[in-house]
Amino acid sequence: MKVKMILPALTEAKGPFWRPIKYSLFPPLGLATLAGYLDENDDVRLQDEHVETLDLDDEPDLVVIQVYITSAKRSYEIADHYRRRGAHVCLGGLHVTSLPGEAAQHADTIFIGPGEDTWPAFLRDFRARRPGKIYRSQIRTLDGLPKIRRDLIKRHLYLVPNSIVVSRGCPHTCDFCYKEAFFEGGKSFYTQTVDDALREIERLPGRHLYFLDDHLFGNPRFASALFDGMKGMGRLWQAAGTVKSVLAPDLLEKAVECGLRSLFVGFETLNPANLREQHKYQNLNRDYTEAIRRLHGLGVMVNGSFVFGMDDDDDSVFGRTVEWAIEQGIETATFHILTPYPGTALYQRMAAQGRMTSDDWDSFDTRHVVFRPARMSAENLEAGYWRAYRDFYRWGAIIKGAWTKDDLLGRLRHIGYAGGWKKFEPLWDWVIRAKRAGSMLPALETILSGFGKHSAERKSEAAESGRASLPACSRQETQT
Ligand code: B12
Ligand code: SF4
């Protein structure tokens, strides 16, 4: 059977004039996971439109498209094209789960929720020539997951070819997050076994890893055993975690010991009223400054995530947030305009209040305002968002942030890392067009390993003064 798997791109990622590096970071892991369920003798091709031009002249029997909200329009175009050519077209992913009725108009079969149970069920039915029209995920487990088909990934086209997920979902329930809608009808947070996760890590070449799990620290027992197992592997890795998990004792130290060098942290807002409104209770009454101090103290860089436009935000939010982030010495920041995704509690609330102003899914990219903000105009929200990026990544701000580090090396690393992402965008653009994103990985590893030394030095200093002792814990299998 000829199978074509496609991750369509949103318009910006294919721009003739400008290609932001973020679209050449990670390969299509979801599709490579699904490819693992195909037979050895199936002829399968995986194309990621973010990094390559799609070949649409082929004639596969089965077409599998992963649909994100921002690529929905493009996904439907491609789906319609292949249906005209007689292929059986399957659509799945987050946007299909949020709006199945819309997606069904462009597909022979649609999939609701994660694919680990529905996809193999469909394949059996398809081979028996009785494919269904809709498959809903009910069984939530990562046990027995086949080997991810990483051989289908064109590694050289990505800066971070070693992306990995060892869990699905998250234990929290924030109103603006995709998670509740996607996992409806079953568990919304579950992990691999520790041994399976370690085996997957061992299969990845090189040193660098990027865990794309929503919350790698979400199950402390699992995370702790995983970090024990990773000790001595010589990895350098990045991941996402919550303020709460950073403040918890011991786990962070273990993570650093086995290679954590940078953490994406969802601060989202500095305003408790906003946190309450979004039901982001796990951030309430947490000392953000202490969390950053802990991370920096262990030599971990911080990528802070902030959302603008919640109901308690007014025009002053941008300046205050950026100034705070710079003063904290946060190395990189990701800003978003609040975006109510269909299917989320936030969307339902906004729609009920008659505040949604757009259903053009292309604009749901967290850079456009698609609802009526409560305490500022949509224009000011959008302008403030762009200003925040400009102000945070000004050389003056980068240097000010760097000066919060207490030694010269720390300052230089801060400048190198923060400047590297934003100040050299023309260089990234050239690298992507030359199809050489992968060749920049050693530079990233060098910077990250520098931070590792930084932390090791600090730890040995602390150990000398009798302060550092990390609890040892035996490796164990854990599953939520
Ligand atoms: C890595 C990532 C990116 C990467 C690359 C994406 C990629 N290569 O896949 C980059 C940086 C480019 C990116 C960009 C953006 N992202 Co992003 N990203 C992610 C992240 C962190 C991980 C994705 C991943 O690999 N997951 C692991 C794999 C195993 O799961 P999966 O891909 O979902 O696939 C499973 C299922 O979805 C399902 N499935 C998927 N497709 C299909 C198809 C069929 C037929 C079947 C049966 C099943 C199926 O089965 C798979 C196995 O279980 C997610 C968060 C998350 N946890 O998913 C956000 C996330 C997907 N991103 C999101 C957003 C909003 C964006 C941006 C718009 C943000 C921005 N401001 O730039 C852009 C635009 C994306 C686009 N191209 O349209 C939102 C999506 C919201 C939505 N409703 O669509 C998410 C959920 C983050 C969030 N919490 O809000 N992103
Ligand atoms: S903590 Fe993050 S991943 Fe978890 S529900 Fe909230 S926004 Fe989503």
Image (cartoon, grey):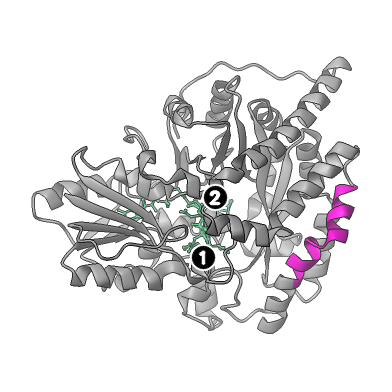
CA gap, disc 1 and disc 2: 16 Å
Res 179 label? none
| For residue 303, side relative to residue 185 (left or right) | right
Q: Indicate the position of residue 68 as horizontal and vertical percent values.
A: 43, 63
Inspect the magenta stretch and tell me whether residue 213 lies in it. Answer: no
Identify the residue at horizontal 20%, vertical 65% (top origin).
108
The residue carrying mark 2 is: 436
Marks 1, 2: nearer the viewer: 2
Identify the residue at horizontal 65%, vertical 37% (top origin).
445
Mark before the other along the chain sequence, 1 or 2: 1
| For residue 18, side relative to residue 203 (left or right) | right
Identify the image quadrant of residue 206: top right
Q: Secondary structure at mark 2?
A: loop
Q: Indicate the position of residue 129 as horizontal and vertical percent values.
A: 8, 54
Q: Indicate the position of residue 337 as horizontal and vertical percent values.
A: 64, 69
| For residue 111, side relative to residue 231 (left or right) | left
Magenta residue span:
387-403
The mark tally for this picture is 2
Residue 177 appearing in the image: yes
Inspect the magenta stretch and tell me whether residue 390 lies in it. Answer: yes
Q: Can you tell me whether the CB of the residue at mark 1 lies under 8 Å from the nearest atom of ligand 1?
A: yes
Identify the residue at horizontal 51%, vertical 53% (top origin).
435
Identify the residue at horizontal 57%, vertical 71% (top origin).
17
Q: Secondary structure at mark 1?
A: helix
The residue carrying mark 1 is: 13
User: What is the three-letter code of the residue carrying label 2?
Assistant: Arg
User: What is the three-letter code of the residue carrying label 1?
Assistant: Ala
Q: Main secondary structure of the magenta part?
A: helix
Q: Is residue 285 above or below residue 337?
A: above
Along the line of sight, the residue nearer the viewer: 405 or 282: 405
Q: Is residue 330 above or below residue 19?
A: above
Q: Is residue 395 above or below residue 201?
A: below
